[in-house]
Image (cartoon, rainbow, N blue to C red):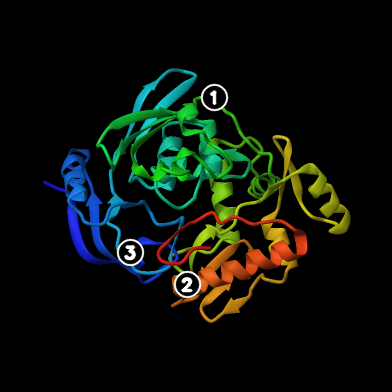
Amino acid sequence: MAAVRIADAPLGALNTFGIEARARVLWRLEALDDLPGLLAALRADPVADPLVLGGGSNLLITGDIDRPVIQVALAGRRVLAGDDASVLIEAGAGESWDGLVRWSLAQGAWGLENLALIPGTVGAAPIQNIGAYGVEQRETFDSLDATDLLTGTARRFDAADCAFGYRDSVFKRPGGDRWLVTAVRYRLSRRPLPRLDYGEIRDELARAGCTAPTAVDVADAVSAIRRRRLPDPAVLGNAGSFFKNPLVEPALAQALAAREPGLPAWPAGGQVKLSAAWMIDRCGWKGHRDGDAGVHAAHALVLVNHGHAGGPALLALARRIRDSVHARFGVELEPEPVVVGPARL
């Protein structure tokens, strides 16, 4: 059995914006044993620089893709080791992230519950260093396996090797996209470790009458909040938060706070993290629509596809938002999704 090859592949169902672009060739990798054959085929391809695709939930495609596209569909979840204090779990890179969260809860483990309902695959989680409600995946990350697409060399990365940052890792930096993640491991706790720093979670649990929450209770609360605040990509195309919350120097944060009362800000390792959503909202973008490209009416940080918006239209809207925030606040917003295709932000 070999990796599945699809020529002139439609990508509309493979990205959560629902953008109707096509790939010259798409490879679907379902078994690790098929990887050597796939690498040989890639070496014979006249166009180098393959694009690795997970769930397409952190991607903005701006046109047809001539690069070979690899859809990672490596499945499997298992417990590797455990005792009364902790458990080490492993999942294939193609597994659903939320599926892994729910499976880990069924093992009686704490650590991933605040990250419930984040779209995408397990393999993409460390690349993006996903986070939500006061928790990042790096806090429980143990290691991952990846293969160099250029040499075929397999390597294990620990947390230090991954060089995690805010929505960042070594895989998002120059040369990092040569690595195809195949499996990821997390070290989770058997003992209750609720992270209830966010008032929204506490309020949700209180409404449910939950005074001694389990990990499942926390995950359910987070899921309920996300469903209220964020559109379902199956209904309204989107890639979640489009811009990162910017990190600025304390002096700029103080100046902005004096000029813009109410600007949310949090200390972040010697810098200050500002709310991108608040600034975008203050610039009047919430609910804005240019044809089918728009900003979600309930969350200014989410760009949406109302039906038939192409990547260039969404990119043009993102540029206008970025420029207006810079003009008013002097702060440069960076996109969270990877922009792929002929146009760039």
Compared with 109, 318 (above or below) is below
- Give residue 206's position: percent from left, percent from top: 68, 46
Q: Identify the secondary structure beneath mark 3.
A: loop
In the rendered structure, the answer to whether residue 96 lies left or right of residue 259 reads: left
In which image quadrant can residue 77 be found?
A: top left
The CA span between labels 1 and 2 is 48 Å
In the rendered structure, the answer to whether residue 164 lies left or right of residue 33 reads: right
- Give residue 209's position: percent from left, percent from top: 65, 45
Task: From the image, tell me which residue sits under label 3.
Answer: 65
Q: Looking at the image, is mark 1 or mark 2 earlier in the sequence?
A: 1
Q: Identify the secondary structure beneath mark 2.
A: helix
Amino acid at circle 2: Pro
Return the mark for residue 312: 2
Q: Looking at the image, is mark 1 or mark 3 earlier in the sequence?
A: 3
Q: Residue at x 36, y 28 (%)?
A: 156
Compared with 46, 133 (above or below) is above
